[in-house]
Image (cartoon, rainbow, N blue to C red):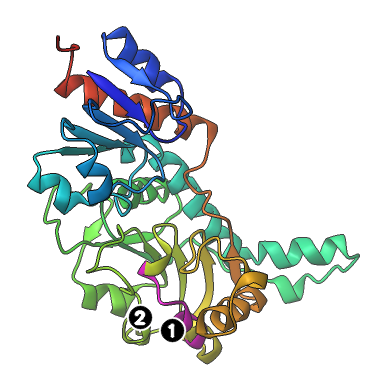
Amino acid sequence: MRVHFLDEVHPVLAERLTAAGHTCIAHDHPEAEALERCAGLVVRSTRVGRDVLDRAPALRFVARVGSGLENIDTAACAARGVEVINSPEGNRDGVAEHTLLLVLALLKHLPRADRQVHAGQWRREENRGTDLHGLTVGIIGLGHMGLAFADRLQGFGVRVLGHDKYRDGHTPPHVEECDLATLHRESDIVSLHLPLTPETHHYADARFLSAFARPIRLVNTSRGPVLHTAALLDALDSGRVLAAGLDVLEFERADLSGLDPGPEASVLERLLRHDRVILTPHIAGVTHEGRYKMAAVLADKILTRFPHAEP
């Protein structure tokens, strides 16, 4: 079958599909946008909506290199019998390690201490940190990423709470499944691991943040709009949130200089100025190993469903 790659991905995916007899059309090939005879699509960030599906009447699957599916109209795919495949297993290790990195950096004031030493300042007491040992970490979303982060917490002497409204049981013994009220009451650190859907948009809003029994540190390595940025900033200013580590932003890749003056620009400006927020540019899952593994996992899944090229 013909598989069109609409984005650049690790070559192992095309190599393995080609070895099985499939025809792979590279993203920069002149035929890449001619989808009439296309049976499979491979994407990373390209949006697959009804317009793309209309141009691919023979389509049988859409494969997304990565975890999130917000750039794919999954409902339209389901209505047309098009299977949607993704590979969250591929970069879960990178996401889990980066999440732990953000947690430790917040507790130990790492960015500020680094800046001060580079500036010739030796402020030890000002940078007195907090031990992770003995704290309670609440994980919201117990999919591949959330559970991988929970695995990394073993050995730190923490209690791990996990909340996922769509999961019941089959959780490893080092994670205590709980309701949201328990997580609000007992967490010191909260990490968000939710997909972006209409249900989870602004999941962590003002009401959510005000429900914690004590001030928390918050980390988000899932999707930016899961967290309401303005509500987070208000919670930081009021002391309900002590610090935040964000690898994803609600207004991601927004060029501040090019934004029209308005609410989004104001919130983003305020976020960038805040000295108790650590920001990274959506790189939690961007590792050399993850790039290979996401493509390799996707190859496994595609070839399980379509092992041989059809005549």
Relative side of 53 to 216, left or right: left
Q: Which mark is residue 231?
A: 1
What secondary structure predominates along the stretch shown in magenta? helix
**In the drawing, what numbered circle is on residue 44?**
none
**In the rendered image, which quarter is residue 197 located in?**
bottom left
Question: Compared to 260, does 193 lie above or below?
Answer: above
Mark 1: give few (<14), some (14-19) or many (20+) Cα within 10 Å. Answer: some
Quarter assignment of residue 224: bottom left
Query: Disc 2 designates what residue?
Result: 205
> Counting residues from the N terminus, which is met first, the one under dot 2 or under dot 1?
2
Q: Nearer the viewer, residue 157 or 230?
A: 230
Report x, y in % for residue 113. 75, 65
Q: Gap between marks 2 and 1, in whole Å?
A: 6 Å
Image position of 194 with respect to 304: above or below: below
Q: Position of residue 148 (x, y in %)?
A: 35, 45
Which portion, as a residue range, is magenta?
226-234
Residue 257 or residue 230, whichever sits in front: 257
Above or below, 169 against 270 in this view is above
Which quarter of the rendering shows the C terminus? top left
Disc 2 residue type (three-letter): Asp
What element does badge 1 sit on? helix
Q: Is residue 215 visible?
A: no
Residue lying at 22% horizontally and 18% vertically, measured from the top left? 1
The magenta stretch spans residue 228: yes
Q: Who is closer to the viewer here, 276 or 303? A: 303
Q: Nearer the viewer, residue 276 or 128?
A: 276
Left or right of 88, for residue 58: left
Are the residues tagged 2 and 1 within 8 Å (C-beta)?
yes
Q: Is residue 7 left or right of residue 171?
A: right
Tell me where residue 163 sits by quadrant. bottom left
Identify the residue at horizontal 39%, vertical 35% (top origin).
6
